[in-house]
Amino acid sequence: MSTRDWILHVDLDQFIAAVELLRHPELRGRPVVVGGSGDPTQPRTVAATATYEAREHGVHSGMPLRTALKRCPDAIFLPSDPPAYEAASERVMAVLREFPVRVEIWGWDEAFIGATTDDPEALAADIRHAVQARTQLSCSIGIGDNKHQAKLASAFAKPAGIHRLTGDNWAETMNHRPTDALWGIGVKTARKLAALGLHTVAELAAADPAHLARHFGPTNGPWYRYLALGKGEAEVVTTPWIARGHSHETTFQHDLTDRTAIAHHVAALATRVAHDAAEAGRHIARVSVKVRFTPFLTRTRQSKLPAPTTDPATIERTALTILDRFDLNRPVRLLGVAVDYTLPDDDQPTLDTLE
DNA sequence: TCTGGGGTCCTAGGACCC
DNA sequence: TCTGGGGTCCTAGGACCC
């Protein structure tokens, strides 16, 4: 075997449920659903995850807790505890970084690894065992020529396995599958592709890029075909990700109709976002307000600031001005405030830095 | 199944300018 | 004042992912 570069995708198995079961070992083997504050009678709250035992009753992540309760009355409902998952995630990533590899963290429960080796399966097995031994968490590892292949391979490897998907076995593995088996094509795009007669990965791979560009845009169209051919990004970026923006939003259990109360919530969300940005040392270039009306009609309005700022009062005032542009004549179920950051190298000088 | 929260990127269309 | 063409900036919305 010859030494060459590989991309590995490490995916923790049932991450949130696994962390909860470490804390509550007595619940092992029982149907457990995690989500919201753990109260399954609360409306407008969905499951973050469900254990295999709960899935057998038809419960899955994204399902409203009230539905989960109906389907599985014996389930144990636990509140979601993001700081605990964050801490567990950091322990796992620390284990990965002890290997002579390049690590790119991709969310809480995933990472891409760039490695140069003649035996990627042996490396993957070593990583799996180290993660299990050090954190008591199980992971699956996909091996590929690029991130796309490695990502799909880790799904084939589940649970607790290792799978290799490269140019050599791409066609036999993927060609017969529906287009939404690809990472980046979801149900909506798959439906549009099907309307063009493109149902399978093989059909998409053979499609005319110009035809795809006409229907999906100059970037997306050709990109879909590229995905169907098994191609993808192969560069592992080890420098920390620089966030493009930040947001907070709240779904209310009971609709808001009072203008003053709505404004109060928007102001509070804006202040929170602005403080987070200041803490992260980031300048805000644009502010967006999101309003979701009942039943589920979502509208956004946004404004670019005259100059980037870190001032919470300016963000709050801007958000309230944007709110004035909405027609608030129907009940509101969600409010959100989002900001775009300036990129660190194009921070514009503000008036006060010039003075 | 009455549908969370936090992100990223792309596209279309209008305004404005030359 | 029957009306081009291009470039850039901004906004709103869509799609996807975890």
Image (cartoon, coloured by chain):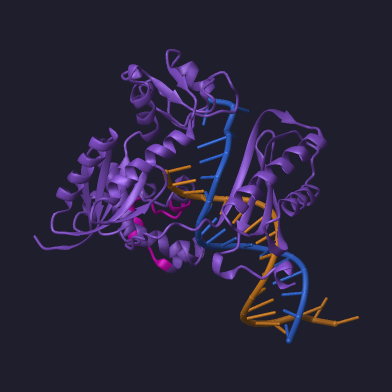
Chain colours: A purple, B blue, C orange
Q: Nearer the viewer, residue A1 or A339?
A: A339
Image coordinates for residue A224, horizontal then vertical, percent: 40, 59
Image-based side of A264 in relation to A75, left or right: right
Residue occupying image coordinates x 59% and y 58%: A282
Q: Is residue A291 above or below residue A280?
A: above
Of residue A129 and residue A170, the one placed in the foreground of this image is A129
Quadrant (top left, top right, bottom left, bottom right) of the C terminus of chain A: bottom right
- Is residue A66 shown in magenta? no
Q: In this view, does A233 lie above or below A161?
A: below
The image quadrant of residue A237 is: bottom left
Instruction: Tell me, yes or no, if residue A176 can be seen here.
Output: no
On the picture, is A200 further left or further right than A269?
A: left
Which image quarter: residue A229? bottom left
- Asked where in the image residue A245 lies, by quadrant, the reply is bottom right
In this view, the residue in front, A192 or A174, is A174
Residue A344 percent location from the top left of the image: 55, 65
Name the residue at the front extreme: A355
Q: Residue A145: where, in percent of width, then height?
A: 25, 59
Residue A205 lies within the magenta run: yes
Q: Is residue A41 left or right of residue C12?
A: left
Image x and y of residue A258, in percent? 81, 33
Q: What stretch is highlighted in magenta?
A: A192-209
Residue located at (38% from left, 37% from top): A88
